[in-house]
């Protein structure tokens, strides 16, 4: 696809990250925490986007996949919506501004899993285990990642893709500071539409971003996905996501 990346991913190992193909998530924990100053070598890294024809093919896959998913899951989606309304006061959906393609912001849709008066609209306070803000039904939805299903609507609208870097809330923190301050090349992850799932998620880098090594590896996975992107890779990630969610869920 003619990518130009001035800092090869093999060099990531020098800052405590990993060159990711399909590793176990626990490999990262065995590596040293990256030093803040060592990240500066990637300040000038540049990723070029895929060609228009390849992006059109990806968009076609998104339209077909999201439309099919919404049709197949129509009854479960309606059932979840009714259950939310019956178990706690408030709207069915949780809407929040997220970073999208080329840093443009959009409203992401999720099933509401928190009590309205306790939820964090800005999203800077990440959910944790036994979070008192989460409703009993919300715990089930988050455990099985069912709260993410309304994002198929975002995909159909063109705000998101089935596969891509997960959309972050503006102002998201990593290692106690703004993500873009912690990782200077952070915004390059927005060179593709954000995804319902992604390479980072199937490699286990999801949930909290307080651990600096995990926060760094998550972004490096996103850049590696953009560099190596193909329709075949998207399909493998989708299949792996479905298999993972059928057997377990993280609740994040």
Image (cartoon, rainbow, N blue to C red):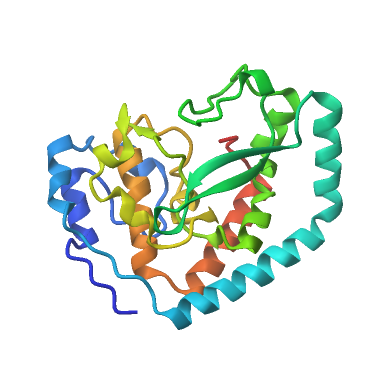
Name which residue lies at 30% across and 34% down: 212
Residue 107: percent from left, percent from top: 58, 46
Q: Quadrant of residue 238?
A: bottom right
Q: Nearer the viewer, residue 186 or 234?
A: 186
Q: Position of residue 41 (x, y in %)?
A: 12, 51
**x%, y% of residue 132?**
62, 16
Is 100 on the left or on the right of 120, as rendered? left
- In the rendered image, the quadrant that contains the C terminus is top right
Residue 235 position (above or below residue 145): below
The foreground one among 216 and 23 is: 216
Residue placed at 70% from the left, 36% from the top?
A: 141
- Outermost residue, bottom side: 53
Q: Nearer the viewer, residue 92 or 104?
A: 104
Res 192 visible: yes
Q: Quadrant of the N terminus?
A: bottom left
Residue 168 falls in image quadrant:
top left
Tell me, yes or no, if residue 175 can be seen here: no
Looking at the picture, does residue 216 appear above or below residue 122?
below
> Is residue 200 toward the left or the right of residue 29 in the image?
right
> Left or right of 5: which side holds 158?
right
Number of labels in the image equals 0
Residue drawn 31% across the image and 34% down it: 178
x and y, in percent, of residue 175 in the image: 31, 30
């Amino acid at each position: 696809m003619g990518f130009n990346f001035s800092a090869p991913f093999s060099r990531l190992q020098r800052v405590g990250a990993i060159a990711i193909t399909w590793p176990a998530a626990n490999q990262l924990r065995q590596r040293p925490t990256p030093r803040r100053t060592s990240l500066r070598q990637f300040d000038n890294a540049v990723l070029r986007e895929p060609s228009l024809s390849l992006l059109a093919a990806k968009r076609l896959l998104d339209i077909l996949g999201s439309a099919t998913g919404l049709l197949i899951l129509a009854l479960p989606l309606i059932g979840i919506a009714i259950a939310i309304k019956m178990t706690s006061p408030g709207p069915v959906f949780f809407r929040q501004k997220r970073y999208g393609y080329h840093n443009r912001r959009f409203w992401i849709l999720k099933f509401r899993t928190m009590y309205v008066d306790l939820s964090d609209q800005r999203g800077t306070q990440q959910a944790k285990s036994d979070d008192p803000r989460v409703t009993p039904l919300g715990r089930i939805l988050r455990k099985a990642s069912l709260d993410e299903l309304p994002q198929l609507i975002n995909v159909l609208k063109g705000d998101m893709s089935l596969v891509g870097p997960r959309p972050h809330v503006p102002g998201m923190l990593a290692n106690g500071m703004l993500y873009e301050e912690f990782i200077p090349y952070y915004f390059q992850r927005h060179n593709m539409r954000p995804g319902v799932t992604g390479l980072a998620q199937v490699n286990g880098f999801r949930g909290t971003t307080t651990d600096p090594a995990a926060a760094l590896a998550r972004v490096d996975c996103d850049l590696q996905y953009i560099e190596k992107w193909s329709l075949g890779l998207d399909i493998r990630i989708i299949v792996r996501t479905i298999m993972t969610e059928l057997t377990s869920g993280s609740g994040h």
